[in-house]
Structure formats: C-alpha cells, structure tokens
Image (cartoon, rainbow, N blue to C red):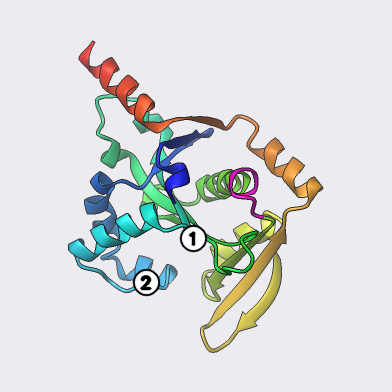
Amino acid sequence: MKINENTLLEGHRVVLVPYNAEHVPRYHEWMKSPELQQLTASEPLTLEQEYDMQRSWREDNDKCTFIILDKQRWADPSVEEEQCMVGDVNIFLTDPTDLSLAELEVMIAEPSHRGKGIGKEVTRMMMCYGATKLGVKKFQAKIGLDNEVSIAMFKKLHFQEESVCKVFKEVTLEMAVDESARARLQGDVGDMKEREYRQSCRDRQGTVSQ
C-alpha cells in the first residue's frame, strides 16, 4: 500500500518501518529457513522474485506491511537499519467486497527476539493502525495447527476460534473491532508514536555525521 510508504510507528521495544528495497536481501536470507517457510506457509523465492514481491507490497491496494526493527539497536545511528531487522507484520484485505475485513500475519524471524512479547506488541500496533488508518473492523489470523505459540498469543489478544480446516491443518481466529476493542487497543499502545519515516532516517544519518 502507498498509504504507509512514509510511515514509521515507534513502540516500546520495536519500530515499524515501510518494507523497502534495501530490506530485501536480509528478508530473502530469512525465508531460506525451512522453519519460517512452514510457519508462514511460504514457498522459497529467488532474490529477483523477492524484489518483485517487495514492489507488490508497496504498490498493491490490498496489502500493507511493515518491517519490524529492534528499537534499541535502531536508536544507535551507527548500526545500519538492515541490521536492526527482526521480522515483519502484514495486513491483507482479503475480500474486495468488504474492505473492513483483514487478515493479519506477524513473523518474528530472528530466534533471539522470540519469546519476549515482541509479537504481541507488534500485533497490537498493527491492529491499532489497521483500525484507525485503514478502517478495518474485523481481523482474522490463519495459523497452522502445530503453531501453538502463535495460537496462544492471538487468543490472549481476545481473538476467538472461528473455524478449523483439517485439510490445510490451520485454524482461523477472529476479532471484531467494536468500540470497547478499539479503546482497549489504543490503551495497550498508548505510547505508540507515528512519525515520518524519511525524516526519521535523515535525523539518524545527521546524528552519525555530527
């Protein structure tokens, strides 16, 4: 989506930034992992295909993605942004007739950053962004039945089991964003700040040159 091409979301432990071409090589290395391919139901792509996918994420109106950065590392201007990457979070508008319905995916690719609550923080941030900026009123998460960690996380975030597909071995969880859910989300991410991404990058580079 074009809407977030210059959007940076700053949370407590993470910074979410647009998925840019310079992020692709690191992302491509992540997706060589059979574990991540299984968890995300993805097929391995060539580097050229990964660049095409990145352009699709930027241009298509039914997809919105952010790269997840380690905020502490990103705060050090001497560290390249690609070296701060820990995963990504995505929204898919899956029904052209109902743009208020979105599928949500989060991937913590770096093993050292798992089990620390980052996935939960990122999911809340993305849901708040989707509800307030994209008009999403219902979120879905489709998760492999063997991915018990992700299923437990989404249930803690008030998602309810909607259906189980034994053929694809996945469960669909849903959460409607009514007024109480919106207020809870905004309270959970009360310290989230939205900034201009390109200006933030210039500020980082300026700090290095000083």
Give the residue drawn at x 25%, y 48%: 21
Of all residues shown, which one is farthest toward the right? 180
**Is residue 142 depicted above or below 186 in this figure?**
below
Q: Is residue 109 visible?
A: no
Count residues near mark 1 (Cα–Cα under 10 Å), then give few for <14, some for 14-19, many for 20+: some
Residue 97: give x, y in percent of width and height. 62, 69
- The residue sitting at the front extreme is 97
**Would you call the spot at circle 2 few (<14 residues within 10 Å), some (14-19), or many (20 or more)?**
few
Quadrant in which residue 71 is drawn: top left
Q: Is residue 89 magenta?
A: no
Magenta region: which residues? Answer: 130-136
Q: Is residue 129 above or below residue 28?
A: above
> Of the residues tagged 1 and 2, which is closer to the observer?
1
Rounded to the nearest whole Å, what is the CA distance between mark 1 and mark 2? 18 Å
Residue 153 rendering spot, x and y as whole percentages: 61, 57
The image position of residue 109, as x and y in percent, is: 37, 55
Instruction: Give the SS element for disc 1.
Output: loop
Residue at 25%, 69% in the rendered image: 45
Q: Which mark is residue 42?
A: 2
Query: Is 205 on the left or on the right of 134, as rendered?
Result: left
Q: Which mark is residue 27?
A: none
Label drawn at residue 62: 1
* Residue at the limit of the structure toward the bottom, as seen here: 167
Is residue 93 or residue 66 the one in the foreground? 93
